[in-house]
């Protein structure tokens, strides 16, 4: 029984949009579990990079990044997925949004001490700090999408956009063959493994890091397959947290939100992270130690909510999902996340004592 037959059968029983929600839930659980077990975090990787100490956190992030790219490019070559059908490729991209939003997001994740993906994963383990920052992130994302901050987002994004009403595929723009994407992904994977060996990162952690990247590729393949058999329009997408967080916030506050992949994704990540923490005996409640820490964390969540929506994607949506299909503006956004993290680290964290201490992945 092939994939299309399975999805058709499920859609006939529960409906196309409910099937999309179930796919989102599945991808979320896989990603959340793997991200929790691997301690995946873009913030930690970016700060290591900024301090010229690329080690464990950078190896984990880079392996997740490269795994997503290798699997997605392999799926494309096998005919299981077409990037040109993806939502993020069929809309106008914003170079200015990627630059400004990426910088803002990078600073915000340093302030919040975790990228948007890490906040959601830690929330599933009982970390009340990240629950608070995550709620601010989601509400700010919604305000940026269609609320009070929407005019500012549109103004900044409109400064410099991609031509033709579509985004740009980096491989096509560079005149590279399709297989070049797979080769690039494999090169990044080799670098990641080299860093992991140097940092003495355990094989189990690396396997889970690969699992998080695989979840991104699986999301692309399943939503593409569902779009081929569904009667109702189904968006071809994969893991991203800024837009879906805003949609889930509206779904909680109103009765207008419909069923979709995005609505299933966020609770799926929470459930997966909870199960991962349960398996690793890492469930515990944690809170803020003082008001300044709380204000900094909430401020970081707000900056990530605005920056992620302006950039067109968050640490996951741009840094993994967008880069895996070589979306040009999201590659630029991912680079700016690192630049913003460097700026944020210089402003908030680089005391002489901290400069001598290794970067710690938040648990």
Image: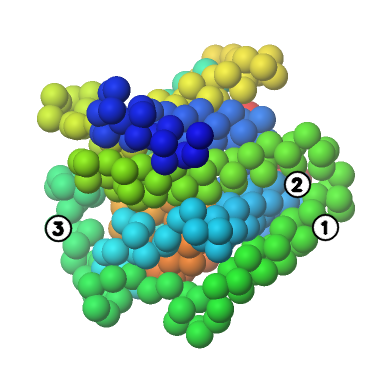
Inter-mark Cα distance, 1 to 3: 45 Å
Q: Residue at x 65, y 69 (%)?
A: 184
Residue picked out by circle 2? 56
Tell me if 213 is positioned left or right of 306 in this view: right
Along the viewing direction, whichever of 269 and 154 lies nearer the viewer: 269
Residue picked out by circle 3? 151
Above or below, 142 relative to 92: above
Confirm whether residue 28 shows in the render: no
For mark 1, give the secondary structure.
Answer: helix
For mark 3, give the secondary structure.
Answer: helix
Which numbered marker is on residue 271? none
For label 1, the crowd category at 10 Å Cα-Cα, with few meaning under 14, some 14 to 19 and many 20 or more, is some
Tell me if 350 is positioned left or right of 7 in this view: right
Above or below, 44 relative to 263: below
The answer to whether the residue labelled 3 contacts the one labelled 2, judged by CB atoms less than 8 Å apart, is: no
Along the viewing direction, whichever of 158 and 28 lies nearer the viewer: 28
Going from N to C along the chain, the mark reached first, 1 or 3, is 3
For label 2, the crowd category at 10 Å Cα-Cα, with few meaning under 14, some 14 to 19 and many 20 or more, is many
**Of the residues tagged 1 and 3, which is closer to the observer?**
1
Give the total number of marks visible in the rendering.
3
Residue picked out by circle 1? 194
Q: Residue at x 70, y 63 (%)?
A: 186
Tell me if 264 is positioned left or right of 284 in this view: left
Residue 45 rendering spot, x and y as whole percentages = 64, 51
Tell me if 221 is positioned left or right of 139 in this view: right
Residue 97 rendering spot, x and y as whole percentages = 32, 66
Q: Residue at x 62, y 15 (%)?
A: 278
Going from N to C along the chain, the mark reached first, 2 or 1, is 2
Going from N to C along the chain, the mark reached first, 3 or 2, is 2
The answer to whether the residue labelled 2 contacts the one labelled 1, judged by CB atoms less than 8 Å apart, is: no
């Amino acid at each position: 029984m092939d994939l299309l037959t399975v999805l058709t059968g499920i859609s006939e029983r529960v409906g196309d949009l409910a099937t999309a929600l179930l796919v989102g839930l599945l991808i979320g659980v896989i990603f959340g579990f793997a991200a929790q077990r691997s301690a995946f975090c873009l913030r930690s990787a970016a700060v290591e990079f900024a301090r010229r100490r690329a080690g464990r956190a950078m190896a984990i992030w880079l392996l997740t990044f490269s795994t997503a790219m290798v699997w997605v490019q392999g799926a494309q070559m096998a005919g299981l997925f077409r990037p040109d059908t993806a939502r993020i490729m069929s809309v106008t991209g914003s170079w200015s949004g990627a630059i400004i939003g990426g910088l803002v997001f990078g600073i915000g994740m340093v302030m919040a001490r975790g990228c948007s993906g890490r906040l959601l994963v830690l929330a599933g383990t009982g970390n009340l700090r990240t629950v608070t920052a995550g709620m601010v992130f989601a509400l700010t994302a919604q305000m940026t999408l269609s609320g009070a901050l929407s005019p500012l987002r549109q103004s900044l994004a409109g400064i410099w956009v991609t031509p033709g009403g579509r985004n740009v595929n980096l491989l096509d723009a560079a005149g590279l063959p399709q297989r070049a994407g797979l080769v690039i992904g494999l090169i990044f994977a080799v670098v990641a493994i080299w860093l992991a060996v140097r940092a003495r990162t355990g094989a189990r952690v690396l396997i889970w890091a690969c699992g998080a990247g695989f979840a991104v590729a699986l999301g692309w393949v399943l939503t593409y397959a569902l779009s081929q058999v569904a009667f109702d329009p189904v968006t071809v997408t994969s893991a991203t947290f800024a837009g879906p967080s805003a949609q889930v916030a509206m779904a909680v506050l109103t009765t207008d939100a419909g069923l979709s992949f995005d609505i299933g994704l966020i609770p799926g990540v929470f459930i997966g992270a909870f199960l991962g923490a349960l398996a690793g005996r890492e469930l515990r409640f944690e809170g803020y130690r003082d008001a300044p820490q709380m204000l900094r964390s909430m401020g970081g969540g707000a900056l990530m909510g605005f920056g992620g929506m302006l950039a067109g994607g968050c640490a996951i949506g741009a840094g993994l999902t967008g880069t895996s299909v070589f979306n040009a503006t999201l590659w630029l956004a991912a680079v700016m996340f690192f630049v913003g993290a460097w700026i944020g680290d210089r402003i908030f964290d680089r005391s002489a004592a901290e400069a001598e201490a290794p970067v710690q992945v938040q648990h």
